[in-house]
Image (cartoon, helix red, strand yellow):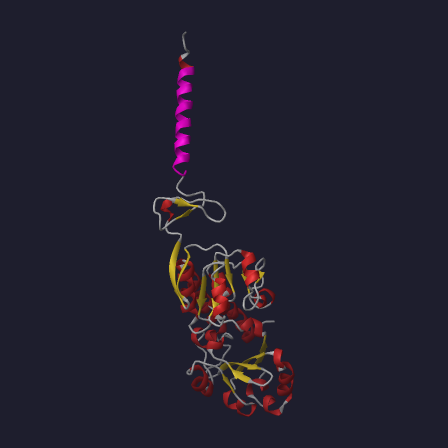
Amino acid sequence: MKVDRSRAIGLMIFVLALVLIVSGCGNGGNGGSGGSVGSSENEGKTSSSKSGETEAPDSGPTTRIYKALNGDIEVPANPKRVASLVFVGELLALGVKPIGTGQAFLEKGLFVEELKGAQPIGDEPSLEKVLALQPDLIIVHNFVKDEIVEQLTKIAPTVVMPFNDRGPIERLHMFAELLGKEKEAEQFILRYEAKVAEAKKRLEGTIKEGETVAYYEIWGKSLWVMSEANGRGVYNLYKSLGLEAPEKVETDVIAAGKGIDISLEVLPDYAADHMFVGVYAGDGGDKRAEDIFAGALWQGLPAFKNNHVYIVDIDQFAPSDINALYKQLDLQLDILKGVK
């Protein structure tokens, strides 16, 4: 039987293509585009992720060791579902949106819009709420009880981080190391530095030479002069913008590295020419603030007489992370420039 030559050639091409396709499937396709997870302990093999996807073996280790306050913790190399009790500013700065966090962050403050879709996990946090989210990494601060941390580790790798004992840039690098986001950290720091340079230009001529700036907070039974360790945008005022503090604030607060609770009678010794003032209403601070503002001592302050007292939203100024500082710069400049 005579076979048509063109049909024979076509059949050969079809068979060759089929062989190539089958061979490609057996070798994992194009080197991991399917999003699988490689194993650092079984090099050359692939393993399944929670979603059932697999990754090529040359995609690198799936976990690494992070030295946390609660020990050397094996964490995901590229976590996808992070539940973080606090620290939302650092995470968002690195491009990581937590799937769950504290209720307050979702309701008020600087990051409400960016956190839309995240779920509340309680203040301790709640083990049931965290479990329901199926995180692959849990982050808590060092005030969470050890027994709760132990229970959380049964849900997912749990890292205990220091709450607020480091500067904002160091803290961002700390989280970048945890999440494998060093490049993103450097990029955000550059953005922050560029905004500081812009803010300095905008501020020229607004604060006269020799004028001082400080942040104060009125509580039910306390009158705080706040330091960088308390957040409140203080880092921006002194470290970034280079503004001056009153002498007593410089020696007793800034140099000491912590806020102090003063009596109303000595406030004139700590008063700045420009006073940022927050009011903590939770323990009766709002009523006390009304009484203070109506008093002769307050109304005799130079900042009051010159209309340089700025009542601020405490929820916007409480955070101390670099992402919050980035946003607070705009708030501070608008306040000082009188922008409504």
x%, y% of residue 193?
43, 66
Q: Nearer the viewer, residue 256 or 15?
A: 15
Q: Is residue 131 above or below residue 232?
A: above
Which residue: 50% across, 47% down?
51
Q: Is residue 14 magenta?
A: yes
Q: How many marks?
A: 0
Q: Quadrant of residue 168?
A: bottom left
x%, y% of residue 329?
50, 70
Which residue: 42% across, 72% down?
167
Q: Is residue 183 above or below residue 3?
A: below
Residue 136 visible in the shown view: yes
Identify the image quadrant of the C terminus: bottom right
Q: Residue furthest top?
A: 1
Q: Nearer the viewer, residue 316 or 200?
A: 316
x%, y% of residue 313?
59, 74
The secondary structure that most of the magenta stretch takes on is: helix
Residue 114 visible in the shown view: no
x%, y% of residue 183?
40, 58
Q: Residue furthest left?
A: 43
Q: Nearer the viewer, residue 246 or 151?
A: 151
Identify the image quadrant of the N terminus: top left
Q: Over which residues does the magenta segment extend? A: 7-29
Q: Is residue 73 magenta?
A: no
Q: Nearer the viewer, residue 292 or 191?
A: 292
Q: Is residue 173 above or below residue 29?
A: below
Which residue: 45% across, 43% down?
34
